[in-house]
Image (cartoon, rainbow, N blue to C red):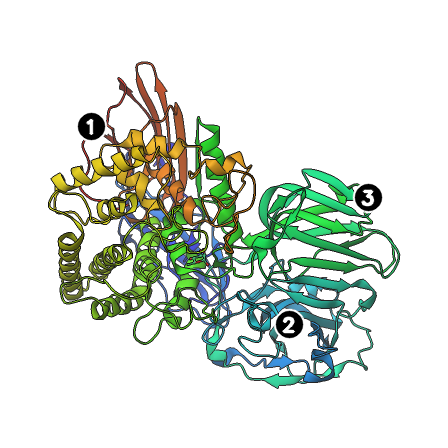
Amino acid sequence: MNHESTPVVATPTAEHHREPFGIGESQPRISWKTIAPTGWSQQAYQLEIARADGTHLTDWVVSEDSVLVDWPDRPLTSREPAEIRVRVRGSDAGVGDWSPALRLETGLLEPTDWSAHAISPPRHPLERLDGERRPPLLRKDFQTGKEVERARLYVTAHGLYEIEINGRRVGDHTLAPGWTSYDHRLRYQTHDVTEHLRAGDNTIGAWLADGWYRGRLGFGGGYSDLYGDRLALIAQLEIVHRDGTRTTIDTDTSWRAAHGPIVSSGLLDGETYDARDEQPGWSSPGFGDSDWASVDIVPRDPQTLVAPTGPPVRCTEEIAPAQVTVLDADRLLVDFGQNLVGRIRISVTGPAGHTVVIRHAEVLQDGELCVRPLRDALSTDRYVLQGGDRETWEPRFTIHGFRYAEITGWRGGDPRRDIVARVHHTDMARTGWFACSNDQVNRLHENVVWSLRGNFVDLPTDCPQRDERLGWTGDIQVFAPTAAFLYDCHGMLASWLRDVAVEQHDDGTVPWYVPAIPGGPQWTPARPGAGWGDVVALTPWALYQDSGDTGLLAAQYDSARRWVGLLTELADPSGLWNHGYQLGDWLDPSAPPEDPGAGRTDRHLIATAYYAWSARHTAWIAGVLGLEEDCQRYEELAHRVRQAFIDAYVLPSGLMTSDTQTAYAVALQFDLLPGPAARTTAGDRLAELVAGGGHTIQTGFIGTPLVTPALSTTHHVDTAYTLLLQQDCPSWLYALKHDATTIWERWDSMLPDGTVNPGEMTSFNHYALGAVAQWLHTTVAGLTAAAPGYRDIAFRPRPGGGITWADAAHESPYGRVAIRWELHASGIKVHTTVPTGATARIEWPDGGVTTLAAGTTTTWRPERPTERPASPTRHD
Ligand code: RAM
């Protein structure tokens, strides 16, 4: 085959790993992307697996599949490296070159692989010093007599850890091992530490801190010791020598412990560090640790140790101060120009014992930090100077949500050089982009991205700043489609959904937030809540739409089934879920600040709608999994609940019992109306309500992601644009008047008069209301997955709102999908990019369809587009 028509395969990937090192799958599924000339399609593929015992070549597999194909060889064993290459054959029978190799390595796959014990500093005198629980250091000296070929560190902790070997930090993870349902699943991390070791004397040391394991968490004062009251380290350092022999250094009773320079550290409260207490050389050989204490072994079942499925949290960006104001002699107010999540690093010079205090806040009030929204989170870091030359410090085991910092006792030089905000979050690959001719809409989109970054810190949280920061199920349920477009969050969310399933109650109730911790009588014990519990059926499906990962559906199916089974018991015989505690359309702007659930839409209308929608999704999941009987049973259930919904909430006139935007949006988007005529009536009424409300928002968490799609699929795209572009409160763009750089929890977290909303729940960094971004992607730009994983793509641009061009791109499992449209006086010009392996078409606003081949195409459609009649159901 000649060179020009040769397909080029990029480096394959394994599962959803960005860094396939220390993975937990013995049979990882493999994916690859091909770039090939227009018209080419894959007919067959071949995989080559290089393992220690030789290179295995599969037969040619006749298949068009390239996403998450089954592992083709015998299962990998623990600690096993492998290299995988792919080549493909096309319709013309020509064979392409081998792809570059994917190098992966498994972690410890069997509980019996673990020889390390969980070791803890002794309770006395280390742990409770003057009522403090001072974070400890642990260390061990060891010898490597023989030359080192390679070395791996498998490590985790009760609490948070950082490791040093021979004075050098291992890896760059933040807040490891992250937060999982620790009693069931504790993640360990794998590091290649070959370069850290040297022949002869070596030392391994660990910092530990409370983190989520035993630090104070939760609202209303919170709770400490939620998982136990003893920190512990589990570390297994496996060294393979040049001669093939092995040495393993485990955490055991030969390790020693002492206080470190961290005086206190909490995720909510911040960290205090006394540099005078540093012990130089503590993690290097030759340090005398005779006055360090011995350690105890504490229980940890190795069955619960799991490898990560997603990337770690790490620093992804540094931001210099945008503005620094000197408040008084010793106090600086720093504005980073961006509400972010992370920590501040300072460089200072001053006398020993001098303390620099850093307080954080998202907003100002009267020129000072406004910390009331933080509630009981102190978010204060303190650095006590050693008194040497320039001292540089960033806290290790805390994290804050802030745009502003007040620094008292500043002893640095130029603040723009000596103060930097370091942004930390799960280091997912960016996969989605959007821009258009309207700068405010672009800023709104940028704010969504920042709220995603700030709240994807190992688990999907509601907020990153106050004494909460919990994995609220409802928030990610509404936001998951947006998140999956913008970032590759599949590995991270797959882990979190495992935790949701393990924490689901025996009767099927899904906790309000996962990991579940006590939350006062409103939240504990958990009660089944519509929109929140439905995460177990809707979010796996949303992720599947983006990734095509049927394995995730299989893993989560039982959880979805148990939830829908519970709803079937709770519902009345007709299928209505019309009793019990519900949050309704949470944070509907008409709800009073102190009662965010008191929205205008009947809570039980929402509950039955979600019941029908989850039953429908469970049927779809069963269908994909080939469970025909289940599929039919859940379809029938969904149909019955739908009918009950219609009978109870849709009046003969076509209006609904709750004459609200959320009610119509839910009914339209969840396919809960009797037919096309009823859809038209509902769409028209929704548009009337939006116009009647002066095109301001009247929806909360439930209605907000649905209202613009409900309008645009019922012939009211102009109304949707007017709503999108509204600037008065409440609206998406209102927040920009107050210089918002993230999405707020409330439409009016900042009131029009510039004061902070008096509600006790007022975050400035909450992604739920940012779910509108998915409408920007799918409808304003017009980039939609018409089949799971973007194997079929529908470009459905719906220009409006005076926007003259828009573009969106998504890095799909097949490769980059992109669209840019531009309005011209005589028509619309659309540039599209379709990856090899996908089919695609443009569905024009007037109903016309243009079929596209893979590759980049420019399509010109004369005349301005007009809308076409409503499409019957929503499947995006
Ligand atoms: C608050 C937050 C969160 C929401 C719950 C119900 O704590 O607003 O986002 O899901 O309430």
Instruction: Tell me if residue 266 comes above or below residue 19 in the rendering.
Output: below
Q: Quadrant of residue 438?
A: top left
In the rendered image, which quarter contains the C terminus?
top left
Give neighbour class at mark 1: few <14, some 14-19, many 20+ (Cα, 10 Å): few
Q: Nearer the viewer, mark 2 or mark 3?
A: 3
Judged left or right of residue 708, residue 462 is right
Residue on which the image places disc 3: 413
Mark 1: secondary structure: loop
Residue 590: image tag: none
Residue 107 in the image: state x and y as whole percent: 50, 69
> CA separation, marks 1 and 3?
64 Å
Cα separation, mark 2 vs mark 3, equals 48 Å
Identify which residue is drawn at 40% across, 41% down.
773
The residue pinned by badge 2 equals 241
Position in image of residue 162 (x %, y %): 65, 66
Circle 2: element type: strand
Q: Which residue is mark 1?
A: 848
Judged by depth in the image, the label closer to the viewer, 2 or 1, is 1
Residue 148 left/right relative to 4:
right
Q: Earlier in the sequence, mark 1 or mark 3?
A: 3
In the image, what residue type sits under mark 3? Answer: Gly
- Left or right of 639? Residue 605 is right
Q: Quadrant of residue 705?
A: top left
Q: Are marks 2 and 1 in contact (CB under 8 Å)?
A: no
Q: Is mark 3 within 8 Å of ligand 1?
A: no
Depth check: 30 or 808 in front? 808
How far apart marks 2 and 1 lie (CA) works out to 67 Å
